[in-house]
Amino acid sequence: MNKYPLAKPYLDKVDEDGVLEVLRSGCLSLGPKYQEFERQFAEKVGTKYACAVSSGTCGLHLTLIAAGVKPGDEVITSPFSFIASSNCIVYVGATPIFVDVDEMTYNLDPALIEKVITDKTTAIVIPHIFGQSADMDPIMELAKKYNLHVIEDACESLCAEYKGTKVGGIGESGVFAFYANKQMTTGEGGMIVTNDERIYKLCASLRNQGRSDNLQWLDHVHLGYNYRMDEMSASLGITQLAKLDYFISERQKIALWYEEALASYSDMVTSPQTADYTTNTWFVYVVRLQKYVDKRDHLILDLAKQGVSTKPYLPSIHLSDYYQKNFSINTEGMFPVSESVSASSLALPFYIGLTKEDIKAIIEYLISTLRAYET
Ligand SMILES: *Cc1c(COP(=O)(O)O)cnc(C)c1O
């Protein structure tokens, strides 16, 4: 009994026809679709180059390589993110150095960065969480001062604008992801964007076994990978991208309905806030419990029984088993904001097709379940 799943992709006949066309063409990889998708995507995000890859995670891996991050380096990042934004640092042998987040936006707090910069620091991986941009001006200033590479993990914030510039194109490179719960989907898939030709060419080579520019078979100049995006995914990318403005405005509308429905319960649950320097394209709708925080995981189970899917969003990376074992300097209590958000946050059902009545019903389930804990 799942009345309200947490997320759901929006797919229509045009998406289906496009994928079928690829299947019938027999050209399933390295065809015309991924190049067309790259061209349109770069135009949408406002960067010179876009490089399609098979996931956001491998996009992040390649941008770290392209930045020249190497074993022994330290890379500053946020503990409040999806784990891939930190794992990519570990992939290249560097050490993630966490910095706590801002209480309102849950994005990395720029005021805390300078303190942790050492002579080993070479880069910042800056996630834009939940649909809004991190505060980029002070981050770019520090990067300039200390000569650091800035990689934007924009996987959750496609088309969010920081002071009028779309995320992904602010740092030296940016990465997007198209898993089925993101603002648009290709099934699995990702995209690297950059204005730097060298980075673009290197990433394009690395995703394809390290082949040289001329794409000569078996001509390998780098240690490459197979991180290519297939043509079915790329076709979905093209037809989904055509609907992206609609997707985003629907998400903004649903977020507004949630905010209205929650307004009178702010003593129990608070709605998310967007900073004034950014627009919000709403990856997820995450509320914070103000009461019964210790019952949060119980609440998730109680809501599931009533057909309402919710989820803790997000667990703090430094407290995950792998990071506790391998980066044991990051103990509990070190990043209090991230940890308290992780403990009190709850993602609510959020996808196109939810009506205003659905939102009211979901909030009624939430509030009545919380009220039952009062007695
Ligand atoms: C979704 C996401 C990714 C990467 O996702 P893939 O599943 O590898 O496509 C990376 N970082 C963040 C913050 C994400 O939300």
Image: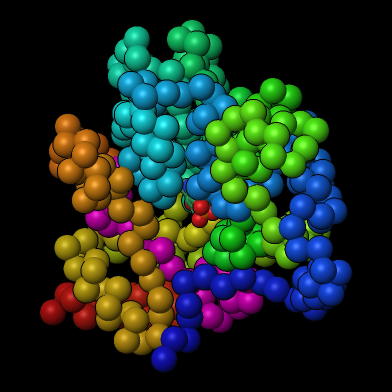
Q: Residue furthest front?
A: 218
Q: Residue at x 55, y 64 (%)?
A: 181
Which of the pair 182/267 is nearer the observer?
182
Q: Quadrant of residue 118?
A: top left
Q: Is residue 327 above or below residue 350?
A: above
Q: Residue at x 54, y 56 (%)?
A: 283
Q: Is residue 288 above or below residue 17?
A: above
Q: Is residue 128 above or below residue 137?
A: below
Q: Whole-percent x and y of residue 373?
A: 18, 76
Q: Whole-percent x and y of residue 227?
A: 60, 48
Q: How many marks?
A: 0
Q: Is residue 153 above or below residue 281?
A: above
Q: Residue at x 36, y 24 (%)?
A: 71
Quarter holding the N terminus? Answer: bottom left
Q: Whole-percent x and y of residue 67?
A: 54, 24
Query: Is-magenta flag for residue 131?
Result: no
Q: Is residue 275 visible?
A: no
Q: Residue at x 33, y 62 (%)?
A: 312
Which of the pair 35/133 is nearer the observer?
35
Q: Which residues are magenta?
A: 338-359
Which of the pair 80/296 is nearer the observer?
80
Q: Quadrant of residue 123?
A: top left
Q: Is residue 20 left or right of residue 293?
A: right
